[in-house]
Amino acid sequence: MNKADEENKFGERDRALEEIAKRLGVRAERGRRFAELTSLRVGGSIDWVVSPETEAQAAALVHEMDVAGIGWRALGSGSNILADDGEHHYVVLSLKDLKGELEFSGERVSVPAGYSLPRLCIDVARQGLSGIEGLGGIPGTVGGALWMNAGAYGHEIGTVTETVRVARGGRVVEVPGSDVQWNYRHTSFKEGELLLGATLRLTPDDPEKIRARMEDAKSRRMATQPHGSRSAGCFF
Ligand SMILES: Cc1cc2nc3c(=O)[nH]c(=O)nc-3n(C[C@H](O)[C@H](O)[C@H](O)COP(=O)(O)OP(=O)(O)OC[C@H]3O[C@@H](n4cnc5c(N)ncnc54)[C@H](O)[C@@H]3O)c2cc1C
């Protein structure tokens, strides 16, 4: 495709996206590559990367992109993505800035989608909350873990998810975890749904015992998987 064709095809979309991002106060960047954003370190150029910082901003952003017919895909830490080396003519919605703060309430913790899963495991263990210590070595975001029901060493995120916050019609909608099908590394979430965060219900336990179980899972992982190499987890 020559420059003039590209301008015709994408110019209008680019102007619409710039206007939406500016109005919502969302960072929008050009010139990024999947190779910098995924653990396999491969993948070509991306037209736009947009990075909302709050759940409300992210919900409004996807709604406006959908209404304007702008194609987008969600990206967490990129630890389970194998991207083509060619050009990616769509918007990547990065959740990495949607980190926020954890909110604890008794046995429950509310966490934004961009929060690091290993960080969450450490934080809840310190609060004496058990149920996800097996997930401590999974190098992704909470959103990525929810999307595919991440699991390891006897724990799966779906089992402890009380509600998931999803972007629908420009708003943050709370979906009961019991409405979601949590299958083996797969869920019933549909392509085009953006997960914004979740409330997990965990079980009180002695922080030292939880920490010991996390350490055990970590050593088993270190003994059976290569570390430091380019990987997407299930194959090396
Ligand atoms: C060394 C290594 C070890 C691993 N070990 C395990 C393991 O033990 N168990 C396991 O289950 N996995 C494992 N994985 C795979 C991976 O870490 C998990 O699948 C993780 O949950 C992916 O999270 P992410 O944030 O990196 O998602 P990404 O790789 O960025 O995205 C994965 C998919 O989820 C979608 N997605 C991400 N966030 C959202 C969102 N907020 N809303 C909608 N869709 C979204 C993306 O569009 C994409 O389709 C491992 C990976 C590596 C590199």
Image (cartoon, helix red, strand yellow):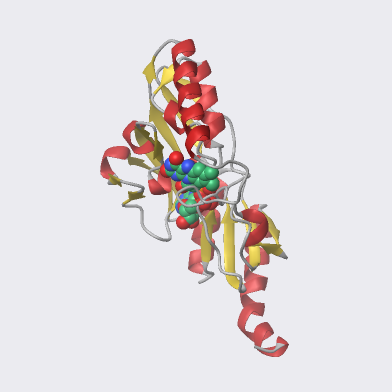
The residue sitting at 46% across, 14% down in the picture is: 128
Residue 20 in picture, x, y percent from top left: 62, 62
Compared to 202, does 21 lie above or below?
below
**Residue 156 location, quadrant:** top left
Left-right relation of 223 to 22? left
Q: Nearer the viewer, residue 161 or 136?
A: 136
Quadrant of the snapshot with the N terminus: bottom right
Residue 131 in picture, x, y percent from top left: 38, 25
**Residue 202 location, quadrant:** top left
Left-right relation of 215 to 159? right
Can residue 42 be seen in this snapshot? yes
Compared to 129, does 69 lie above or below?
below
Residue 30 in picture, x, y percent from top left: 71, 64
User: Of all residues shown, which one is farthest toward the front?
Assistant: 223
Looking at the rendered structure, the number of numbered marks drawn on it comes to: 0
The residue sitting at 34% across, 38% down in the picture is: 158
The residue sitting at 51% across, 61% down in the picture is: 73
Left-right relation of 94 to 69? right
Compared to 66, does 228 lie above or below?
above
Q: Nearer the viewer, residue 175 or 185?
A: 185
Can residue 55 be seen in this snapshot? no
Residue 133 in picture, x, y percent from top left: 44, 26
The residue sitting at 67% across, 52% down in the picture is: 25
Q: Nearer the viewer, residue 211 or 143?
A: 211
